[in-house]
Image (spheres, rainbow, N blue to C red):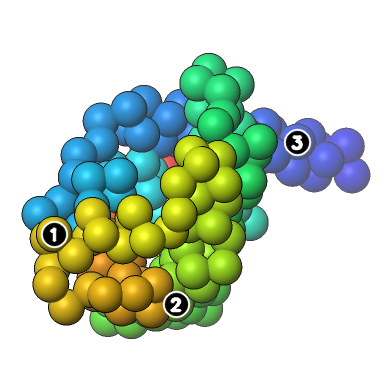
Amino acid sequence: MKSELSVKERGNTKTIAKIGVLSAVATVLMLFDFPLWFAPNFYKLDFSEVPVLLGTFALGPAAGVAIEFVKILINFVLNGTDTGGIGELANFAVGCSFVIPAGYIYKHRKSFSSAIIAMLAGTVTLAVVGSMMNYFVLLPVYSKIYGAPIQVFIDMAHAINPAISDLKTFVLYAVVPFNIFKGIVISSITLLVYKKISPVLHR
């Protein structure tokens, strides 16, 4: 019994250590962000979800949520917040919307085709949840914080894409494409590197 508990404790310690390392890598990757050509420049792409998704595939959905949480928490501590934590909570929810469905699908059938399906599902939920969070939470919060009407953000997007004329078209033509593009990029990178580093993550 003691040996079984010892093995379990060592396994838990290893998992916690891996979560810590992947969270640290994700936090560093958050620092290297850049805007995309089809969305306002306050929407920036970074690759911090790559280690989160890698951890999710290797350790399970719960570990993925933990990595996402620690990543957001470290960034919050180091860089502070302009939104009273609301933006961070929204980012956490959006990140989880990507890795949780992907993780659950891959957990039940670990194969290349299953990984593709898992990441497609994650990308779809990322687009849906990201759109809802922007429409109902993020844009209204940023509008209040910066003392600017939402129309200012809409006008910035309209300058890039004339089809954007109100909040709904802003979400449809800027937020949705941004999150779909992000999901595809993160998924593609994960596919390229997962097999190579999988042995390390499963030790």
Q: Is residue 83 above or below residue 43?
A: above
Q: Nearer the viewer, mark 1 or mark 3?
A: 1
Mark 3: few, some, or many residues within 10 Å (few <14, many ≥20)? few
- The residue under label 2 is 128
Label 2: how many Cα within 10 Å (few below 14, some 14–19, many 20+): some
111 on left or right of 79: left
**Residue type marked 3:** Glu
Task: Find residue 112 and report its image quarter.
Answer: bottom left
| Residue at (57% x, 68% y) in the render | 136
Q: How far apart, in angstroms, are the residues tagged by discs 1 and 2?
A: 24 Å
Compute the Cα span from label 1 to label 3. Answer: 56 Å
183 shown above or below 14: below
Q: Residue at x 63, y 56 (%)?
A: 62
35 relative to 78, above or below: below
Q: Residue furthest top?
A: 78
Counting from the top left corner in percent of width and height, residue 19 is at 55, 37
Mark number displayed over residue 9: 3
Q: Residue furthest right?
A: 1
Q: Which mark is residue 159?
A: 1
Q: Earlier in the sequence, mark 1 or mark 3?
A: 3
Q: Amino acid at mark 2?
A: Val
| Residue 77 left/right relative to 10 | left
Residue 156 image offset from top left, x and y in percent: 23, 54
- Residue at 53% x, 18% y is 78
Specify which label sits upstream in the sequence, 1 or 2: 2
Q: Is residue 100 visible?
A: no
Q: Looking at numbered disc 1 in the image, what kind of residue is underneath it?
A: Ala
Could you say which is closer to the camera, residue 104 or residue 181? 181
